[in-house]
Amino acid sequence: LRTDVIPSFPMNLIKSSKWKILFLGYCGVILYVSSLSLKELPDGPALVSDKILHLGEYGLFGILAWGAFVVRKGVFPWGLVALGAWFGIIDECWQDWIGKSRSADVWDAAADAVGSLLGVMFAQLFWNKR
């Protein structure tokens, strides 16, 4: 039996799929938490601005997006930053549309975009992809 003619299954497809599932699941968690009323949310520390929470939330978004969509290091993936900014705007619109004593805030969307940028930058600098 000749093994050179049998196609091999690309293992990077499996790894990539895991990251895509994590990324999409995280997007769902963001939208779920955004649909909760303020009463349903746990009280955060009073010393931490909600903008810092948005930075962290979308920083993780950027890292997961990197894992899901970047194949190799090289050119900076500005598209992932744009995806994070776009999703942050959608998230804010979702909060406003759902109601439940939540409203859209342009500064939250800005913090989401910056968090996405920082997450993608972090992954670009410290994640070894070939």
Image (cartoon, grey):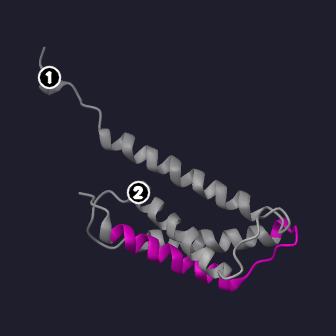
Most common secondary structure along the magenta stretch:
helix
Mark 2: secondary structure: helix
Q: What residue did someone put label 1 on?
A: 3
Q: Nearer the viewer, mark 1 or mark 2?
A: 2
Compared to residue 2, the image places residue 12 above or below, namely below
Q: CA distance from mark 1 to mark 2?
A: 31 Å
Q: Amino acid at mark 1?
A: Thr
* Residue sitting nearer the eye, 17 or 7: 17
As for residue 102 lying within the magenta part, the answer is: yes
Residue 125 percent across, percent down from the top left: 31, 71
The image quadrant of residue 32 is bottom right
In magenta, the rendered stretch is: 97-124
Compared to residue 115, the image places residue 1 above or below, namely above
The image quadrant of residue 36 is bottom right
In the visual, does 64 lie left or right of 124? right
Q: Residue at x 55, y 72 (%)?
A: 56
Q: Residue at x 76, y 64 (%)?
A: 42
Neighbour tally class for label 2: few under 14, some 14-19, many 20 plus, Cα within 10 Å:
many
Neighbour tally class for label 1: few under 14, some 14-19, many 20 plus, Cα within 10 Å:
few
In the visual, does 3 lie left or right of 83? left
Q: Residue at x 52, y 47 (%)?
A: 21
* Residue sitting nearer the eye, 73 or 123: 123
Compared to residue 106, the image places residue 27 above or below, namely above
Residue 67 percent across, percent down from the top left: 41, 57
Q: Residue at x 51, y 70 (%)?
A: 59
In the visual, does 109 lie left or right of 41? left
Q: Amino acid at mark 2?
A: Gly
Residue 1 percent across, percent down from the top left: 13, 14
Q: What residue did someone put label 2 on?
A: 67
Mark 1: secondary structure: helix
